[in-house]
Image: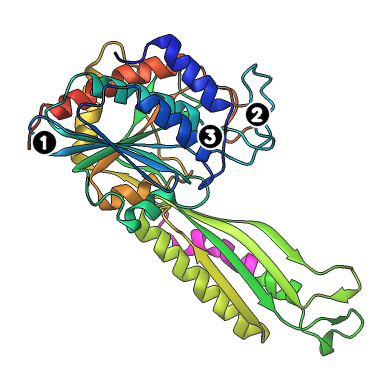
C-alpha cells in the first residue's frame, strides 16, 4: 500500500530531526532504507554507494528508464523554529527543505512499488548536494551506469510559492555557480616604510575593484551574471603592511557558457593584478558539479502541459533564480527537468526559521506521480 498522509507526516518529522552534513548521512540513509524495505520488493532492487541509495524498479516492458532524484543532506545551521520535532543534532538543520524532498520521493516510490510499471524507474537518494557536488560525484563514480536514466526529474522547495504549487520554466531554472578563492602574496613591513614592502591590501583592493567591471563591461547586457566577493582578509594591525590578502567570492550565471566566460575574465584579472603589483597569486576557481539547471525542452514541455491541465494543481511560470543546485550537472549529462514545489514560508531557504507547510507533501506526490505515470505510458 502506498504511504498515507499520517505516515508521510511522521516520515517528514522523523527526517527533520536527524539532519546530517553531506557524505555523513549515515543515520538518514539507514532511516530511508528501513522505509523503502517496507514497500513490496517483487520488482525493486536496492543498491547503496557511500551514503547514497539507488532503487531500481523493473518494468514489465522496460523500454526506457525514468529517473527521480532527491537530495538527502542538511546544513550547518542551528535551528530556531521552535517545532516540537526540531533537529536533535546541534548545529545541523534541514534548512533547505531536503526533508520535504525525501518525504515526497518516498511517497512517489511507494506508489510506483505498488503496481509494476511498464518502464523501469530509478529513484536516486543523493548525498552532498550542499557541500560536495554529490550528483557529479556519483555520476563520475559510475553509480548510474547500470541503471542509466533516459530522462530524470527532481524538485526543490520554494518558500515564496503557495504550499503545493508547482513552478517551472523552459530554459534555465537555477544558475550555475563557481567559488572564487584568491590569495595574493607580497611582502609585509612597517607602515612607515612602504617602499620596503609590497602591500597586498592595495593589490587585493585593486583586484576587487577590477572584478566589478566584469558584469558591467564584459557581459552582454541582455544576458545575466553575478560576481560577488564576500570575504577579504588581510593584515593584523593598522601600522603593519600586510604581505598577504585572501579574497573569496562566487560567480553566478544562467548558462555554462557564460559561467566559463566570467571565470576566464577572473583568471585574466588575477594574473594582471599579480603582474601589476609584482606579487604572486594563487587562484582557485571551484565549480564542481554546480552547473546551471538548464531544463530539457521536450521533457519540460510535457511536464508544463501536464501541470497546466490538472485542475488540482496551481501551476506558476517562474523566473530563473541565481541560487545553485548540483542537479545541473546531472541534466548536463541526462535529459531532464527540475521544478519548484511551493511550501509557503516568510523565511528564505537556509534560514534557521524555515518551517515548510506540510500540505505540500501530499499535493506534490499526487502531481508528480500523475505526471510520471504519463511518462510510463510512453514506451520509446
Q: Secondary structure at mark 2?
A: loop
| Prevailing SS of the magenta stretch | helix
Q: Residues within 10 Å of mark 3 (few under 14, many from 20)?
A: many
**Labels 1 and 2 touching (C-beta < 8 A):** no
The answer to whether one can see residue 264 in this image is yes
In this view, 203 is above or below 55: below
Q: Which quadrant is the C terminus positioned in?
A: top left
Please provide percent x and percent y for residue 215. Answer: 50, 59
Q: Earlier in the sequence, mark 1 or mark 2?
A: 1
Magenta residues? Answer: 207-221
Q: Residues within 10 Å of mark 1 (few under 14, many from 20)?
A: some
**Residue shown at the point (55%, 38%) measured from the top left:** 74
Of residue 192 and residue 148, the one placed in the foreground of this image is 148
Number of numbered tags placed on the structure image: 3
Examine the image and state in which quarter residue 36 appears: top left
The answer to whether one can see residue 307 in this image is no
Mark 2, residue position: 88
Mark 1, residue position: 62
CA gap, disc 1 and disc 2: 42 Å
Q: Secondary structure at mark 1?
A: loop
CA gap, disc 1 and disc 3: 34 Å
Please provide percent x and percent y for residue 248. Answer: 63, 61
In this view, 274 is above or below 136: below
In this view, 377 is above or below 193: above
Q: Which quadrant is the N terminus positioned in?
A: top left
Apparent side of residue 50 relative to residue 276 in the rendered image (left or right): left
Amino acid at each position: 500500500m502506498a504511504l498515507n498522509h499520517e505516515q508521510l507526516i511522521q516520515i517528514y518529522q522523523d527526517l527533520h530531526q536527524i539532519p546530517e552534513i553531506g557524505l555523513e548521512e549515515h543515520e538518514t540513509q539507514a532511516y530511508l532504507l528501513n522505509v523503502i524495505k517496507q514497500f513490496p520488493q517483487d520488482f525493486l532492487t536496492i543498491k547503496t554507494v557511500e551514503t547514497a541509495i539507488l532503487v531500481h524498479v523493473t518494468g514489465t516492458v522496460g523500454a526506457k528508464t525514468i529517473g527521480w532524484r532527491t537530495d538527502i543532506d542538511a546544513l550547518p545551521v542551528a535551528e530556531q523554529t521552535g517545532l516540537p520535532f526540531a533537529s536533535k543534532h546541534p548545529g545541523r538543520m534541514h534548512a533547505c527543505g531536503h526533508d520535504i524532498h525525501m518525504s515526497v520521493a518516498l511517497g512517489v516510490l511507494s506508489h510506483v512499488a505498488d503496481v509494476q510499471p511498464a518502464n523501469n524507474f530509478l529513484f536516486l537518494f543523493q548525498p552532498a548536494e550542499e557541500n560536495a557536488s554529490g550528483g557529479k560525484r556519483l555520476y563520475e563514480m559510475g553509480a548510474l551506469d547500470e541503471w542509466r536514466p533516459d530522462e530524470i526529474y527532481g524538485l526543490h522547495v520554494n518558500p515564496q510559492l503557495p504550499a503545493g504549487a508547482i513552478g517551472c520554466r523552459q530554459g534555465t531554472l537555477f544558475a550555475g555557480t563557481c567559488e572564487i578563492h584568491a590569495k595574493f602574496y607580497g611582502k609585509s613591513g612597517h607602515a612607515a616604510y612602504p617602499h620596503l614592502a609590497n602591500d597586498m591590501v592595495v593589490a587585493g583592493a585593486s583586484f576587487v575593484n577590477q572584478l566589478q567591471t566584469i558584469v558591467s563591461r564584459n557581459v552582454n547586457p541582455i544576458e545575466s551574471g553575478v560576481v560577488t566577493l564576500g570575504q577579504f582578509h588581510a593584515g593584523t594591525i593598522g601600522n603593519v603592511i600586510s604581505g598577504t590578502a585572501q579574497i573569496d567570492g562566487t560567480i553566478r550565471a544562467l548558462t555554462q557558457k557564460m559561467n566559463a566566460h566570467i571565470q576566464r575574465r577572473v583568471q585574466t584579472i588575477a594574473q594582471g593584478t599579480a603582474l601589476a603589483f609584482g606579487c604572486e597569486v594563487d587562484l582557485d576557481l571551484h565549480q564542481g558539479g554546480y552547473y546551471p539547471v538548464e531544463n530539457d525542452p521536450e521533457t519540460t514541455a510535457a511536464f508544463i502541459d501536464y501541470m497546466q491541465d490538472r485542475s488540482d494543481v496551481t501551476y506558476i511560470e517562474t523566473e530563473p533564480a541565481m541560487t545553485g543546485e548540483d542537479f545541473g550537472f546531472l541534466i548536463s549529462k541526462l535529459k531532464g527537468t527540475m521544478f519548484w514545489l511551493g511550501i509557503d514560508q516568510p523565511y528564505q531557504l537556509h534560514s534557521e526559521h524555515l518551517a515548510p507547510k506540510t500540505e505540500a507533501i501530499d499535493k506534490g506526490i499526487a502531481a508528480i506521480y500523475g505526471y510520471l505515470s504519463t511518462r510510463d505510458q510512453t514506451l520509446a
